Amino acid sequence: MHVAGLNIFEFPARVHQHKFMTQLHEAYRSTTELRKPFAHRVAHGALGRFGPLYWEHEPNLDLDYHIRHSALPKPGGDRELFSLVSRLHSTMLDRSQPLWEAHLIEGIKGRRFGVYTKIHHAAIDGVAGVRLTEGGCSTDPNASPGPSPLSLEAHEALKARHGTVHSAELAPSDFEFKAMAEFLKAQFDTSAHLLGVIKSYAATWLGIGEGLAVPWRHVPHTMINTEVSSSREFVAQSWSIDRVRAVSEATGVTINDVVLAMCSGALRRYLEAQDELPEHSLRALVPVSVRQKDDFDSPVAISYIIADLGTRHEDPLDRLVTITKSTRAGKEMLGELTSREASLYATLMQTPLFLASMMGVADWFPPVSTVISNIPGPREQLYWNGAPLLGSYPVSAVFHGFALNITFVSYHGNLDFGIIACRRTVPRVQRLIDYLEQSLAELEALV
């Protein structure tokens, strides 16, 4: 359950590359106070593994263990880079240490270097990960070298740049728990006043709903919904957001719906090539950020909707219409909740999904087919100690029953896709990159 980010930078002009990497390594270490969770480890209470967990400060933090320096073998292309990231992402984080690692990677062709940062998902979500990158960077290529991206100083400076100086209240209030209880009661108790929510779910299960997708109903079993091994395969690619926006404006749907249609067409082609295309359409768990604009401190603030990907339709327009219908219905349901209530709702409603995975039955009765996540990132060009950030690629998590994850970050006019899969279960995952391009071209031709 660790997630990661792979940031690709270009060396500034007229610098000695090896010396510059050494300076960056020292910059990571040059801090007296790290922000949470980088100086905290997971501790058990009196009940051990059967009791609650909590964060405990690690007084003997060994930064040499957590910050590592690597170099690619020649020719240092994307293939070698993705192979290294796949291997790094295949190993678990040491539970006796703070749950993170940072790898500085040199030797990438084209005067480039990379930073791969791996953190347990309990400590960070996608938006918090993007802000971690943003906090260590500047929009000014000539800015003086800043503090370590992991430092409390960099985090507070980022909050100040966004006009946020107070810390978020992370613990839910009694009022929010009460509001959440009322909402859940509305789903399971027909005497409750929020009968509309019940009707939406009931209609969906009876097959007469207005596009709302729910877990387990008509979710097909495919090669994606199997047990996963420890090995991973990672690939990445960027697409111009202007291409996606043109399709969005021509069809009157959101950019996210167009990207889901890209993924739908790619997954349909991939499963067809494997002779695995099911009768029913794939369903995707789509995380939705419910983070308030001024919340820079919550490690995780997400809810989710379930999107019908319409993969049973050969016509790309039919797939897009199906996707749009289901995402609109899901957003309308979430619209009844405040951001804090939506986050609590997600925690409670995802429990059956994770239990199904932990109990080993998700590959028999998959609640959803896969996970497709959209993370909004900065629109400006960013620099780290003068080095321009070329791309920011997410590396998410897969687990039993969900052997493929597609996540993308919007950054500086591009959509940076990161695809992670179980190497054994989902072979030749790099083909999805070609299929995504074909699907986007297909949508462009349509409009």
Image (tube, rainbow, N blue to C red):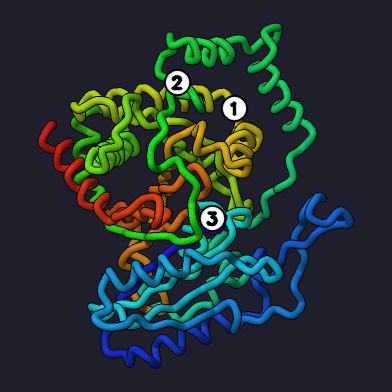
Dot 1 or dot 2, earlier in sequence? 2
Which residue corresponds to mark 2? 212
Q: Do the CB atoms of the residues marked 3 and 2 lie less than 8 Å apart? A: no
Decide which of tag 3 and tag 2 comes sooner along the chain: 3
Out of 351 and 57, give the one closest to the viewer.
351
**Classed neighbour count for the residue bearing mark 3: other residues with Cα under 10 Å, few (<14), some (14–19), many (≥20):** many
Of the two numbered discs 1 and 2 in the rendering, the one whose residue sits closer to the viewer: 2
- What amino acid is found at the position of numbered circle 2 in the picture? Leu
Considering every residue shown, the one lying at the far right of the view is 46
| Quadrant, the N terminus | bottom right
- Residue for badge 3: 128
| Residue 226 versus residue 253 in the image, above or below | below
Q: Quadrant of residue 171?
A: top right
Please say if 398 is above or below 273.
below
Q: Is residue 15 left or right of residue 121?
A: left
Residue at left offset 46%, top offset 43%: 226
> Depth check: 200 or 433 in front?
433
Q: Position of residue 307 (x, y in %)?
A: 41, 30
Give the amino acid at mark 1: Leu
Amino acid type of the residue that numbered disc 3 sits on in the rendered structure: Ala
Q: Which residue, as the protein is rendered here, is positioned at the far top?
A: 191
Q: At 70% across and 18% down in the image, what residue appears?
A: 185
Residue located beneath label 1 in the image: 337
Tell me which label, 1 or 3, sits earlier in the chain. Answer: 3
Q: Position of residue 23 (x, y in %)?
A: 46, 88
